[in-house]
Image: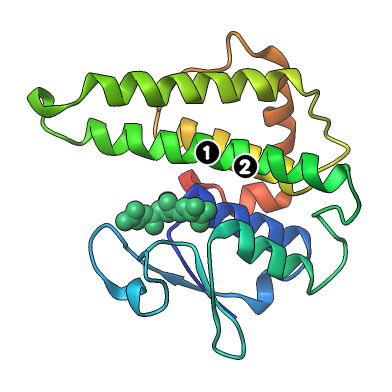
Amino acid sequence: MRLLYSALSPFARKVRVLAFEKALADRMRLEPAAPYQDEAVRVLNPLNKIPTLVTDDGEAVYDSAVICDYLDGLAEPRLIPQGQPERRRALTLEAAADGLGDAALLVVRERMRPEGERRQDVFERQLKAIAAALDLFESVDLTVDRFGIGEIAVAVQLGYLDARKVVDWREERPALASWFEDVSKRPSMVATDPSAS
Ligand SMILES: N[C@@H](CCC(=O)N[C@@H](CS)C(=O)NCC(=O)O)C(=O)O
């Protein structure tokens, strides 16, 4: 398998952490891609986004949630619950984390615009989504005993908020901060830490 990725992409990191946790990382060749700079990924993915996975049969798979679902079926332990309501809850937590990531990316891209051209309404709308998602993560009692798809999705997005200095989120969310400190020590998180690459 080949994974088109960048070290800073939180969505690609979600795939890499899940692959690591399932001992599949060695079967996945990492190929750097720069979707904001060129069009190389578009032949595989019409959206020209990373992560994009190419299976051993040459099939292109995207987006990150679909790649994680594919990888989860390849080996134990299952990190996406099979039965309801656990499956629905885990995937909803993943969706909230991915949505926070989409909002954080928009904030980062908006900050790259010349100062006079930055749109205040974009910041307000996206920062509101980020704050509400963080409040949700603080309230859901994340536990270090479980590191499934939902927890992985949350952890990589918190890492992105820190790496890109999007918001200071720890002070009002002590449970989330303490959980993140603990899970950041997992080998899968250390191996994919964007600040280490
Ligand atoms: N929903 C997608 C989001 C992926 C995404 O937004 N990737 C960014 C990099 S972190 C990207 O490739 N952006 C290129 C673009 O928007 O043109 C997923 O989960 O894979």
Dividing the picture into quadrants, the one containing residue 36 is bottom left
Above or below, 93 against 190 in this view is above
Circle on res. 95: 2
Above or below, 141 against 70 in this view is above
For residue 86, side relative to residue 31 (left or right): right
Residue 161 location, x and y as percent?
47, 32
Neighbor class of circle 1 (other Cα within 10 Å; few <14, some 14-19, many 20+) is some
Above or below, 75 against 196 in this view is below
Q: Is mark 2 within 8 Å of ligand 1?
A: no
Secondary structure category for the residue under label 1: helix
Residue at the limit of the structure toward the bottom, as seen here: 57
Q: Which amino acid, by three-letter code, is at mark 2?
A: Ala
- Residue 8 in view here: no
Residue at 87% in and 43% down: 86
Q: Decide: marks 1, 2 in contact (CB < 8 A)?
A: yes
- Residue 187 in view here: yes
Residue at 38% in and 22% down: 125
Provide the residue designation for mark 1. Answer: 99
